[in-house]
Amino acid sequence: MKQKTLWSWQSFFLCAFFNGLLGAAIFVPFSKGLSVVNQYLTPLTSQVKSMESLPPELGQVLTQIKDLVAIADQYGTIIIWGSVAVLTLALWLSLLLTGRRRIEKASEEAKKSVAATPAVTTRKEVVTPEPQKKSKEETLTAAFQILSIFQRQGRFIDFLKEDLSLYDDAQVGAAVRNLQESWKKAFQEYFTVEPIFKEPEGSQVTISAGFDASKIKLTGEVIGEPPFEGVVVHRGWKLVKVDLPVFTGSKQAEEWVIAPAEVEIQKRDSTDA
């Protein structure tokens, strides 16, 4: 159990770290590119008193560039970091399940090795592998249910598999808005979370001695001993309740059907009869 818990945290931090680097590698050039475009576009448009005084082709080009920059500035950050968060979650679930299967396999092989060793006493050894098998099944079932819920509500897996480079920013922004509404509805239906701090972000708070480090992360000039005076940068979240539906699907480990394939049957011609 300790190995599983350790692997859960290690895989999460590993995914968050590398996906954070990926997000930064995309976001920084994106922000600088917008800044450069605005640096040259703003003086150009400010010197023109009226867009109608320009040639039609040039006026149309400037208008399209301004609209594109405005859309990228409004939705670019949300799309980049939202995609990083979704990718991190999916990759973490994949690593979590793979790692736990390998840990259980190694544990079973170790128990078989111990059982094959000649006993030196008459004490009867009791081997109870059933709890581990049940834990594995429960873990896979929970992961399967979560993926099924988000796939059913907003085609979660289809979104991850889609090549977003084929669409412009306006199309991606509209799609992300609809997906966020669907996933939000599913999340609120099955999960209940509460903020760790009741105070809004930006509020002054006092951190007393003996605070729970798993709930409060201190940053900035952390010098000396508590109490500390600081500002709430993020309120934090804690899971209060999980209300997943009763699992009634197939429990075959090799085929966890998250969403069935759909086939539309075409109408037959009368001549085919």
Image: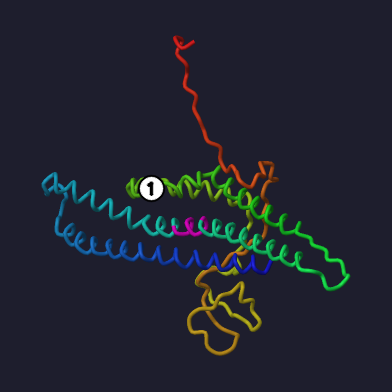
The residue that appears at 54% across and 78% down in the rendered structure is 218
Between residues 143 and 210, which one lies in front from this camera angle?
143
* Left or right placement of residue 86 versus residue 47 in this view: right
Q: Is residue 44 left or right of residue 11?
A: left
> Does the segment drawn in magenta span residue 86?
yes
Outermost residue toward the bottom in this view: 224
Residue 160 position within the rendered picture, expressed as x and y whole percent measured from the top left: 46, 50
Residue drawn at (28%, 51%) of the image: 68
Is 125 situated above or below 162? below
Q: In the picture shown, does residue 258 fall above or below 44?
A: above
Closer to the camera, 45 or 224?
224
Question: Which span is picked out in magenta?
Answer: 84-90
Question: Which corner quadrant of the image does residue 46 belong to?
Answer: bottom left
Q: Is residue 226 above or below residue 71?
A: below
Which residue lies under the disc numbered 1? 163
Q: Is residue 23 magenta?
A: no
Residue furthest out toward the front: 118
> Predominant secondary structure in magenta?
helix
Where does residue 33 sit, x and y in percent of width and height?
27, 62
Of residue 1 and residue 43, the one placed in the foreground of this image is: 1
List the single residue furthest toward the right: 122
Q: Residue 140's x, y, as percent?
A: 64, 52
Residue at horizontal 37 percent and vertical 49 percent from the top: 164
SS type, badge 1 = loop
Asked whether, in this view, residue 202 is left or right of residue 127, the answer is left
| Image point (22%, 49%), residue name | 63
Mark 1 nearby-residue class (10 Å; few <14, some 14–19, many ≥20): few
- Kind of residue indicated by mark 1: Asp
Q: Position of residue 273 (x, y in %)?
A: 49, 10
